[in-house]
Amino acid sequence: MADRADLVAGTAFDPARFARLLSGLGHNALLGLGYAAHGPDWMELQLPYADRLVGDPDTGVIASGPIVSLMDMATSMAVWTRVANFVPLATLDLRVDYLRPAVPGRTVTGHGECYRLTRRIAFVRGQAHDGDPADPIAHVAGTFMFTDAA
Amino acid sequence: MTALPPYAQLLGLTIDQDVTSDRPPRLVMPPADHLAGRPGFLHGGALSGLLEMAAILAARHTFGDEPVAIKPIGMTVDFLRGARFAPTYARGHLVRNGARIAAVTVEAWQDDETKPVATARMNLSLTR
């Protein structure tokens, strides 16, 4: 368990380090989320396959809840990456379209992007795939609120 | 009643009432450190998982013994209040039980059912 104080300490915001710290906390740790890559306004996290994430025991396909958690985290990390700071955020809404089931056994990669910022609201979108970004398993769109904005 | 899948067990979900009534069953998710999101609050993803399971359970409840394969098409979650570390309840309701599609609304609440912490709409693809 990382110390939460680590998340706000220091001067330069390091998205990769930050993502690794957050991945070790709370529900992210339970799911086994891990850092993959980031850019100026995007973040990619990975969700390894695990039997305990299965939603349909007949097929071995993981439930959609872990995909939502992955995309909620990847998109909120994209906001922090774009603003280069850990500012308090709350998810307002998140829409997820399940394009096809993830293939059992495969690691799911979630790509989150922050495409618009206002004083109070961050607009995000993203996709999840299980190996081929051109053949996604889910598409998401959502909004976050900056909880310390006036 | 069908057994809850491994992911529901990971979240600690149980069916806590109304199993025999006409209302869809209510799920409860006890608070736990491994469900934490931002400090002091439950993770939106864990709440979404609870809502999803309640939606599917409501559909299963409606179908009864009829063998229907259910696949989620999409889900829209509105997070209305921060969910604190307290037992969180959820119940789904079928607003449309079609031949191929079921449209479900779900609410999650904590101490007061009239003050939901999150609501969701979910479309399910059905194979009868």
Image (cartoon, coloured by chain):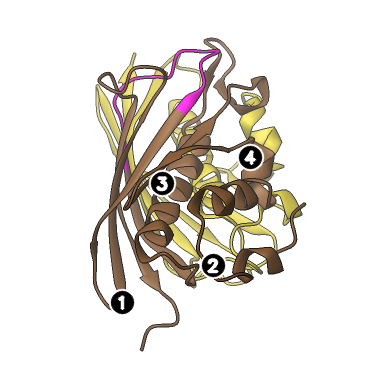
- CA neighbours of label 2 inside 10 A, class few (<14), some (14 to 19), many (20+): few
State which quarter of the image contains the C terminus of chain A. bottom left
Write down the region rendered in magenta.
A96-108
State which mark lies toward you, 4 or 1: 1
Dot 4 falls on which chain? B
Which residue in the structure is indicated by mark 4? B19
Which residue in the structure is indicated by mark 3? B93
Cα distance in 3D space between marks 2 and 1: 29 Å
Q: Is A118 located above or below residue A73 in the figure?
A: below
Which residue in the structure is indicated by mark 2? B113
Cα distance in 3D space between marks 4 and 3: 14 Å
Looking at the picture, tell me which residue is in the foreground, A126 or B121: A126
Cα distance in 3D space between marks 2 and 4: 18 Å
Q: Colour of chain A?
A: brown
Residue B128: percent from the left, percent from the top?
34, 13
Cα distance in 3D space between marks 3 and 2: 14 Å
